[in-house]
Amino acid sequence: MGHWFTDNIINAGKLELFCFFAAMIVAFIFIRVSVRLIRAQVRWWPGNVSPGGLHIHHVVFGVVFMLVGGIGGLALDDSYTIWRAMTAAIFGVGAALVLDEFALILHLKDVYWAEEGRTSIDAVFIAIAFTGLLLLGMQPLANTDLQIGEGEGTAPQGAFHLLAVSTLINLALAVVTLIKGKLWSGLFGLFIPFLLIVTSIRLARPNSAWARSRYRADTPRGQAKLATAERREERLRRPIIRAKIWLQEFIGGKHDLRQGRP
């Protein structure tokens, strides 16, 4: 394990990214345990930070951590590896605190325990998945078959043009996939371009922006596509969504219709 970490993390120049990744996961677990203890009104656990009756959300502390970690990382020279790793970890803590209240920022109201609060869990999952794929060495929007390795000399100008066109096509397919309401397919498609080809061609989810604009009920073709999309949603995606909601509430606590926090 030690050799793997040295070869694939330290020697590969990914120590800062690893520290960010690990700190983000630890901080997210800690803050979720904390808010669930607060919600359960456990006496021995400190409650919300409310000086003078003003409830300070942990997104505020997250912003401070991100500023300290980000500015510190930019100010330090590359030779200060350990210090840069520490600032990356501080940035990761801040990112977890901010993303855990992503729904609050999105809706501009306290929906932490409301149904809309599940968006925060999705945001954290996406950040963790994206960072994890980067740690594994995968590159977003990159066609490795077209890339020129180091030490092979100067690549022909046509190769760079082909790589640029391929990247733009992959990006366009990713945008189409996201507009069709396929968030996770769009994310993983950034690292697996072939997946974007499949997901961008297939029907959109019925509640997506693509379906609302293209599957119009006043045309027979639009009605047929919408009906097919709804059948697929009910048959294939509903079980997955129920499983995702169970996982979200297992990690983040059960949401309800009540606005605000205890």
Image (cartoon, rainbow, N blue to C red):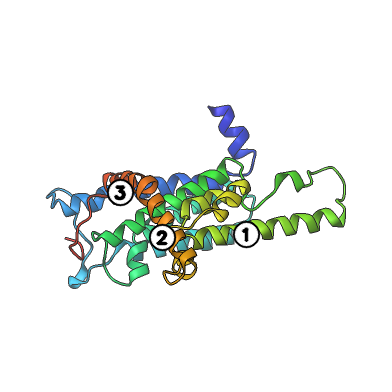
Label disc, if present, on residue 252 of the rendered structure: none
Residue occupying the point 41% across, 60% down: 206
- Could you tell whether 226 is left or right of 256 in the image? right
CA gap, disc 2 to disc 3?
19 Å
Question: In the image, which is nearer the foreground, mark 2 or mark 3?
Answer: 2
Image coordinates for residue 58, horizontal then vertical, percent:
31, 61
- Rendering coords of residue 254 (x, y %): 22, 50
Q: Tell me the distance, in whole angstroms, between the alpha carbons under discs 1 and 3.
A: 29 Å
Q: Which mark is residue 171?
A: 1
- Would you say the residues marked 2 and 3 are in contact, meaning their CB atoms lie under 8 Å apart? no
Q: Nearer the viewer, residue 78 or 181?
A: 181
For label 1, the SS is: helix
- The mark nearer the N terminus, 2 or 3, is 2
Read off the residue under disc 3: 245
Residue pointed to by mark 2: 206
Mark with earlier residue (1, 2): 1
Q: Residue at x 57, y 54 (%)?
A: 201
